[in-house]
Image (cartoon, grey):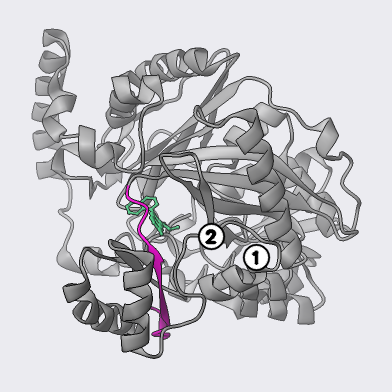
C-alpha cells in the first residue's frame, strides 16, 4: 500500500493523513468546491476536486471517489466517519474496482447496518439484549401482546435506523397502535424501510461502547470502553475512557461480548460495539458501528495504540501485533467536541469566520481539528469544528486539564460549545460520575453559562458590540444558504 485516498474532509481527513505519513504512505485528498482552501487539501501529497459543495454532489458520490483513485493511482481508500464510511454498496464497488477499502467487508457492513440482522447475528453468541421482538413487526395485535409481556414503557425502533433516529417511546398500552403507525411511516420516509421492532425502554441508561479490532486472520481484540453518556439529542458531546462506573469484572464481560459480536459477522478492522447499561449495571447490546468513530482518540490515549495505523495494517493483510493480554488501560482520557453551535440559542448552528483561533497546548492536551485562524466554517457539513482531548494519570487530572485547556482555547468570530464543555466538567454530577444519558436535559439551561465574572461580562459586552458591527458589514445568511446546508437535515450520529 503506497498511496491512500481519504474520502473525507475536516479533522478526520487530517487525522488519517498523519498516520499514513508516519507510515511512509502517500496521501490523496478529495475536496468539494467549498473546501478548496481546507487544511486537509494542503496537507495531502495530492488533491482532487470532486464537485460542488453539497455532499450529495461531492463527498457522497461513489463514482467520483473511485475515479479520483484511478486518476492518482491510489491503491486504498480510508472513508473516515460519516459520508460513505458505512455504505456497503460503496465497499462493494471499491472492491470490484480493485481498490482496498480500509474498513470491514461489505457483508459485515450489511449485517450490522440493520439493527435486526445485527441482533440476530449477536444472538448466536448469547449476547445480552433488551427484551423485545426479534423480528420486524408485521402483526400489530401480536406485537401489542409482546409489548404487554415485556412491560411498558417500551421503545419502538426502526431496523434501518441508527443513532437514535426513528425511535419512539410508548408509555402505555393505549398508545401502542397510534405510535406504531407513526413509527412505521417515519421509518418508511426516513430510511425507505418501514421495518420496526420493540424493546423494553431502559429509562436512565449509560451509553457504553467497546472498541474492537479484528484482522483478516481471525484474531479479534477489544480495546476497552468509552463512556458516551453525555449527549444532546443523540449528538455526543463528551466522551471518556475508561468509564467511571465499570468494575473490572463488568469491563471484562462487556469486552468479551463485544469480541463475540464482532466474531458474529467476521469483523475486520476497527469497529465499535454499542451497549446500554442500566441502574443495576446490567448491560445490553444495541448495535455495532462499522467505522472509526469520532471519539476514537480517547481509546488511543489510554491504550497507546494508533487506531488508524492498525486499520491500515489490517487492510494490508497483516496480523494484529498484540493480543488481548498485551492490552491495558493506563490513565484517563476525556474528549470534548467543539461544535459551531450557540448554547445560548438552544444550540443553533453558528457560521462565519474564525477571527481568532488559538488552540491549547502543554502536557496531556491533544487537539484534532481541521481549521485555522481566518478560515470560514462552511455551512454545508457537520458543525463539529474540533475535538479537544485531555489525558491524565486519573480522571481527576483529565478533568482539571480539560478545564485548563478550555480556558486556554481562544475562538472568536463564531459561537461554540466550548463553554458548555466547561460547564459539564465543573458539574457535580459529572465530577462524581453520577450521570446518565439525560445529563444535558436534566442539568443544563443556557443561563447557567452566564455566571461568569464581571470581567468576563465586560469582555462579552465588547465582543458583542464588535459583533454587531461586524455583522452589519458582512453578507447576511440567506434562507437559500440555509436550505443548501446539510447541518440539520443530514445530521448523522457518528
Ligand atoms: C435504547 C435506550 C433505552 N432502552 N434502547 C439511542 C441511540 C441508539 N444507539 C440507541 N439508543 C438508545 N436505545 C432501549 N431499549 C436508550 C437509548 C439512548 C437514548 C435514548 C433517549 C435519549 C437519549 C439517549 C441517549 C443514548 C441512548
Q: Earlier in the sequence, mark 2 or mark 1?
A: 1
Q: Nearer the viewer, residue 128 or 374?
A: 128
Is the N terminus in the top left, top right, bottom left or bottom right quadrant?
Answer: bottom right
Asked which quadrant contains residue 254, the reply is top right
Q: Residue at image x 14%, y 23%?
A: 450
> Would the CB of label 2 be found within 8 Å of ligand 1?
no
Q: Residue at image x 77%, y 66%?
A: 266
> Would the CB of label 1 be found within 8 Å of ligand 1?
no
* Dot 2 alpha-carbon crowd within 10 angstroms: few under 14, some 14 to 19, many 20 or more: some
Q: From which residue to which does the magenta span run?
A: 190-203
Q: Is residue 493 left or right of residue 185?
A: right
Residue 185 in picture, x, y percent from top left: 29, 84
| In this rendering, the label closer to the viewer, 2 or 1 | 2
Q: Nearer the viewer, residue 292 or 25?
A: 292
Secondary structure of the residue carrying tag 1 is helix
Residue 464 in picture, x, y percent from top left: 11, 29
Residues at badges 2 and 1 in contact (C-beta under 8 Å)?
yes
Q: Residue at image x 69%, y 70%?
A: 108
Position of residue 358 relative to residue 82, above or below, is: above
Secondary structure of the residue carrying tag 2 is loop
Asked if residue 39 shows in the view, the reply is: no
Q: Is residue 340 left or right of residue 121?
A: left
Q: Nearer the viewer, residue 148 or 47?
A: 148
Residue 231 in picture, x, y percent from top left: 36, 44
Position of residue 487 relative to residue 346, above or below, is: below
Q: Which residue is mark 2?
A: 129
Asked if residue 35 shows in the view, the reply is: yes
Q: Which residue is mark 1?
A: 122
Q: Residue at image x 31%, y 67%?
A: 489
- Residue 155 tag number: none
Could you tell me how far apart the alpha carbons at marks 2 and 1 are, in whole angstroms? 9 Å
Amino acid at each position: 500500500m503506497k498511496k491512500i485516498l481519504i474520502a473525507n474532509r475536516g479533522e478526520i481527513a487530517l487525522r488519517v493523513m498523519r498516520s499514513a505519513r508516519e507510515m511512509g504512505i502517500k496521501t490523496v485528498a478529495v475536496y468539494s468546491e467549498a473546501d478548496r482552501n481546507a487544511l486537509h487539501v494542503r496537507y495531502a501529497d495530492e488533491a482532487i476536486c470532486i464537485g460542488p459543495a453539497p455532499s450529495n454532489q461531492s463527498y457522497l458520490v461513489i463514482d467520483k471517489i473511485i475515479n479520483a483513485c484511478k486518476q492518482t493511482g491510489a491503491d486504498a481508500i480510508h472513508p473516515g466517519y460519516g459520508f460513505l464510511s458505512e455504505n456497503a454498496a460503496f465497499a462493494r464497488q471499491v472492491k470490484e474496482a480493485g481498490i482496498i477499502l480500509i474498513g470491514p467487508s461489505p457483508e459485515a457492513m450489511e449485517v450490522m447496518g440493520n439493527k435486526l440482522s445485527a441482533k440476530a447475528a449477536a444472538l448466536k453468541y448469547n449476547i445480552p439484549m433488551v427484551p423485545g421482538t426479534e423480528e420486524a413487526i408485521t402483526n400489530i395485535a401480536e406485537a401489542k401482546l409482546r409489548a404487554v409481556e415485556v412491560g411498558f414503557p417500551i421503545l419502538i425502533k426502526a431496523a434501518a435506523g441508527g443513532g437514535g433516529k426513528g425511535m419512539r417511546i410508548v408509555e402505555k398500552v393505549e398508545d401502542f397502535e397510534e405510535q406504531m403507525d407513526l413509527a412505521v411511516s417515519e421509518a418508511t420516509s426516513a430510511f425507505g424501510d418501514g421495518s420496526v421492532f420493540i424493546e423494553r425502554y431502559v429509562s436512565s441508561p449509560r451509553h457504553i461502547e467497546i472498541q474492537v479490532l479484528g484482522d483478516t486472520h481471525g484474531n479479534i481484540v477489544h480495546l476497552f470502553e468509552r463512556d458516551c453518556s453525555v449527549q444532546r439529542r443523540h449528538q455526543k458531546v463528551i466522551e471518556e475512557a475508561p468509564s467511571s462506573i465499570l468494575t473490572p469484572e463488568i469491563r471484562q464481560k462487556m469486552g468479551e461480548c463485544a469480541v463475540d459480536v464482532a466474531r458474529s459477522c467476521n469483523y475486520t478492522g476497527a469497529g465499535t460495539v454499542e451497549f446500554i447499561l442500566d441502574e443495576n449495571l446490567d448491560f445490553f447490546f444495541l448495535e455495532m458501528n462499522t467505522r472509526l468513530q469520532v471519539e476514537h482518540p480517547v481509546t488511543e490515549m489510554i491504550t497507546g495504540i494508533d487506531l488508524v495505523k492498525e486499520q491500515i495494517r489490517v487492510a494490508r493483510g497483516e496480523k494484529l501485533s498484540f493480543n488481548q493480554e498485551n492490552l491495558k488501560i493506563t490513565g484517563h482520557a476525556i474528549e470534548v467536541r467543539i461544535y459551531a453551535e450557540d448554547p445560548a440559542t438552544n444550540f443553533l448552528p453558528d457560521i462565519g469566520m474564525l477571527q481568532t483561533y488559538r488552540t491549547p497546548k502543554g502536557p496531556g492536551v491533544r487537539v484534532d481539528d481541521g481549521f485555522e485562524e481566518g478560515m470560514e466554517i462552511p455551512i454545508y457539513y457537520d458543525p463539529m469544528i474540533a475535538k479537544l482531548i485531555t489525558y491524565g494519570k486519573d480522571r481527576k487530572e483529565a478533568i482539571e486539564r480539560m478545564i485548563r485547556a478550555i480556558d486556554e482555547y481562544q475562538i472568536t468570530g463564531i459561537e461554540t460549545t466550548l463553554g458548555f464543555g466547561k460547564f459539564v466538567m465543573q458539574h457535580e454530577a459529572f465530577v462524581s460520575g453520577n450521570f446518565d444519558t439525560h445529563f444535558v436535559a436534566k442539568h443544563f439551561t443556557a443561563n447557567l453559562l452566564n455566571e461568569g465574572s464581571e470581567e468576563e461580562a465586560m469582555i462579552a459586552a465588547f465582543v458583542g458590540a464588535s459583533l454587531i458591527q461586524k455583522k452589519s458589514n458582512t453578507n447576511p445568511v440567506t434562507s437559500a444558504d440555509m436550505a443548501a446546508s446539510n447541518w440539520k437535515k443530514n445530521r448523522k450520529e457518528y
